[in-house]
Amino acid sequence: MSNSDPRGRGLTPEQRIQYQRTLDRLDRYAGLLDSRFRIPFTRIRFGLEPLIGLLPGIGDLAGFGLSLYLVGEAVKLRAGSRLIGKMLGNVAVDFVVGLVPVLGDAFDLVWRANDRNARLLREHIEQTLRPPQPHTPWLTRALWVVFGVMVLALIAVLVAAV
């Protein structure tokens, strides 16, 4: 999924399809880890990561490793250090708080680092896929302003002459 232009200009249709497939795959993965299942008669959603986290120590470490997959995808997509830093921060908060018995497991249900990271990647990819906006050069705008001022001045002279 390499592209010389990180803003998406010049993407081929195949590259656009590949980005969309990547989005779908990342959403499914994050959902499986954080929000695939629902507790009946509630709005509480959970995934495999809170369940894995119930295993003391090893579960939190396994959840950490699974969460790093999305960060690895961001690196492959050349998402930029700022976005990757945010994603690593989400994973770190999830891991550190997850180490606290009981509270960490409850926190996993609310924090959903993988869903957050998938959303960040989705926004990045959608920004990449968005067609570039036509850019009006400043000179064109300046000429329109000068033309408008000249028309207003002409109208003022005609009104004053009458």
Image (spheres, rainbow, N blue to C red):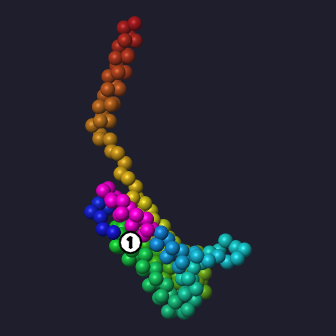
Q: Is residue 41 visible?
A: yes
Q: Is residue 68 left or right of residue 34?
A: left
Q: Nearer the viewer, residue 81 or 79?
A: 79
Tell me residue 99's x, y (percent): 52, 87
| Disc 1 secondary structure class | helix
Vertical order, 30 against 150 (above or below)? below
Q: Position of residue 81 (x, y in %)?
A: 34, 69
Q: Quadrant of residue 89?
A: bottom left
Residue positioned most to the front: 14
Q: Looking at the image, which residue is at 46% across and 82% down?
A: 66
Q: Looking at the image, is 8 positioned above or below residue 49?
A: above
Asked if 141 appears above or below 2 in the picture, the reply is above
The segment highlighted magenta reads: 8-23
Taking 7 as reference, is 33 left or right?
right
Q: Is residue 107 visible?
A: no
Disc 1 marks which residue?
A: 74
Kindly identify the residue that appears in the image at 50 percent across and 79 percent down: 94
Q: Position of residue 67 (x, y in %)?
A: 46, 80
Asked if the magenta segment contains residue 9, the reply would be yes
